[in-house]
Image (cartoon, rainbow, N blue to C red):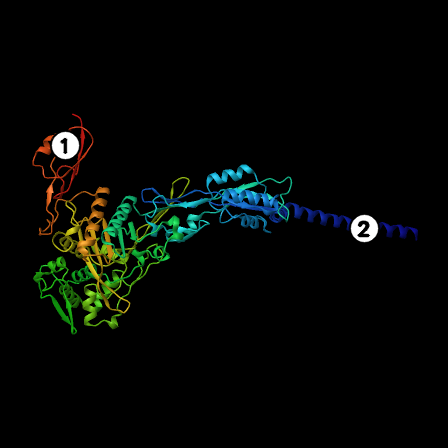
Amino acid sequence: MIRNTHATVRKRLFAIVLTALFVFMVLLGRLAWVQLVQGPELTDKAKSLWGRNIPFEASRGKILDRNGKKLVYNVSAPSVVVIPAQVRDPAGTARILARILKAPEDKIYKQITKRVIYDWIKPWGRKITEEQARQIQGLRLPGIVVTEDSRRHYPFGTLAAHIFGFTGADNQGLAGLELIYDEKLTGSKGSVSFGSTASGTRLPGTHEEFTPPRDGLDLMLTLDYHIQAVIERELDQAMAQYQPENALVIAMHAKTGEILGMASRPTFDPAKYQSADPLVYNRNLPVWKTYEPGSTFKIITLAAALEEKKVNLKEGFHDPGHVTVGGARLRCWKAGGHGHQTFLEVVENSCNPGFVNLGQRLGKEKLFEYIRNFGFGEKTGIDLNGEAKGILFRESQVGPVELATTAFGQGVSVTPIQQVAAVAAAVNGGYLMQPHVAKAWVDPETGEVLEEIKPKVKRRVISESTSRQVREALESVVARGTGRKAFIDGYRVGGKTGTAQKVGPDGRYLQNNHIVSFIGFAPADDPQLVVYAAVDNPKGIQFGGVVAAPIVGDILDESLRYLQVPKRKNQIPPEDTPQTVPLVTVPKLIGEDVDKIRASLYSFPLEVRGQGNVVIDQIPKPGERVKKGTAVRIFLDQK
């Protein structure tokens, strides 16, 4: 009996030991699981409960021109952050900050006593000066931290303002490229982390951890700073001379769709957009504005008629000054008409009845097929916001009158960027390109190109042979027709004028209120640049050939020289008229004595630079052809 009792006790003790050992092993396994497997995750959760982060903004990516010139970038503008639980003397701190930041003391006091973990002192503490930052840092105020921050800087003021757009107080894109490419330009924030209690008091023994921000990518544009600057200058001169309601210019590479320059007036300063009229900064006229194109649209009718072999430019046409279509009398701009002329002269003279005839030869289905193929009635897809698509007649609503007016650019609504893309297609061999402003994304640290935006062909609209005929006809317009004021000696320039009536609120055409325009390209045998200028309701004379053509001519002249495009010798000679200023050859003055030059029958006005009596250089260079009366700048030195 006793033996049985001892055996039972031993069994029970053994079972208890096994149970205890099992429990111990389970607890040990659980401890190992928590420590080794779940440890990092639980530690992170704990840190998230007592850890506090003060953000550090990333540097927003720069915006560069096609040659790497910095057009938009960030400059240091520190900001002030408050950690209310760490502020020991709220009243004194508020008084000191108010004095340095030039802010209301009561407002600062409310901000630094909020029941929050941390907060920006705004607006007075955002984007402060370096001097203000040094003063605050030097005082070492408990709970007050000066963080690294920046603001967007536009070093050239209003240059390309509608393209760049602008950013808000937090460096977020609000308009233009700043908005469209905001994600890539922004980068990612960094932070300074420290341990604190739930109330925000710093935990003893903890140390700060700095996570650096990752800067945004640099955006390289297709824009060329020099060409853009020339465009801006010409627009300013046009606004001063003609006092129009608005004006715009687009310069595009004819074969790639790259926008080399684009601007409009009125404009604004992106750094001070808050003080600008929202109707100005929200409307990028080259892509937003829609209007009847006028005679620049005739290029499309011409291209379609040539492609369909509906016309030979050498055949004759008689213009009595008007044409009657569907009971409507459509007049030519020249009273009495142009009389008998070839179709090449129809193009040179921008003769409305002649283009009505071409539209009738094509028919509405074929004409509107080409209009749509050239990109009208749809967005071009340019990487700028606010683009419109224009308005075309529905073919079911097109009668004889609508067909006739469409053929010479009246009754349809288009955008400037559509016209530039379409004319580029007409002269570049027939390829409709998608216009674009972004060229590449660049690593801000290494300068390495990470992504390149390639030119995009949307479709082919006409053949090379047709495109060549269009180029030759439009070159003749500049040499002998309505575009003479865009003629550049040595460069083969083609183009077309436009003078379009504006429609009023009642749907009727306004009197003496036109949008005058000119679209030109060069060199005519191998187009590189297409430039379009439109001036809305200029004061005084309202003809595209008088107002807009010289603007385009000057932009093409400077741009071609800057791009070092070789001059051509096989240029169509200009037709002399009483209004044409004759061209003369600049003589060689280098090496000559300035007194002898002045005593001679020299007919050029002189602009003298330097000291001395011998000419060591001159502008324009010897042998160049310039308009009679052009001043020659000579540079002097001693013998």
- Where does residue 268 sit, x and y in percent of width and height? 34, 51
Residue 493 disc label: none
- Callout 1 amino acid: Ile
Q: Identify which residue, 240 or 64, lies in the foreground.
A: 240
- Where does residue 23 sit, x and y in percent of width and height? 75, 50
Residue 16 disc label: 2
Mark-to-mark CA distance, 2 and 1: 117 Å
Mark 1 packing: few (<14 Cα in 10 Å), some, or many (20+)? some
**Which marked residue is nearer to the observer: mark 2 or mark 1?**
1
Q: Residue furthest right?
A: 1
Q: Taking the image as drawn, is residue 467 in sight?
A: no
Q: Earlier in the sequence, mark 2 or mark 1?
A: 2
Q: Residue at x 51, y 42 (%)?
A: 100
Q: Taking the image as drawn, is residue 604 in sight?
A: yes
- Callout 2 amino acid: Ile
Q: Is residue 609 left or right of residue 580?
A: right
Residue where numbered disc 1 is placed = 590
Q: Identify which residue, 449 or 181, lies in the foreground.
A: 181
- Where does residue 304 sit, x and y in percent of width and height? 19, 62
Q: Secondary structure at mark 2?
A: helix
- Where does residue 21 sit, x and y in percent of width and height? 76, 48
Quadrant, the C terminus: top left
Q: Residue furthest bottom?
A: 327
Cβ atoms under marks 2 and 1 closer than 8 Å: no
Q: Secondary structure at mark 1?
A: loop
Q: Residue at x 69, y 47 (%)?
A: 31
Mark 2 packing: few (<14 Cα in 10 Å), some, or many (20+)? few
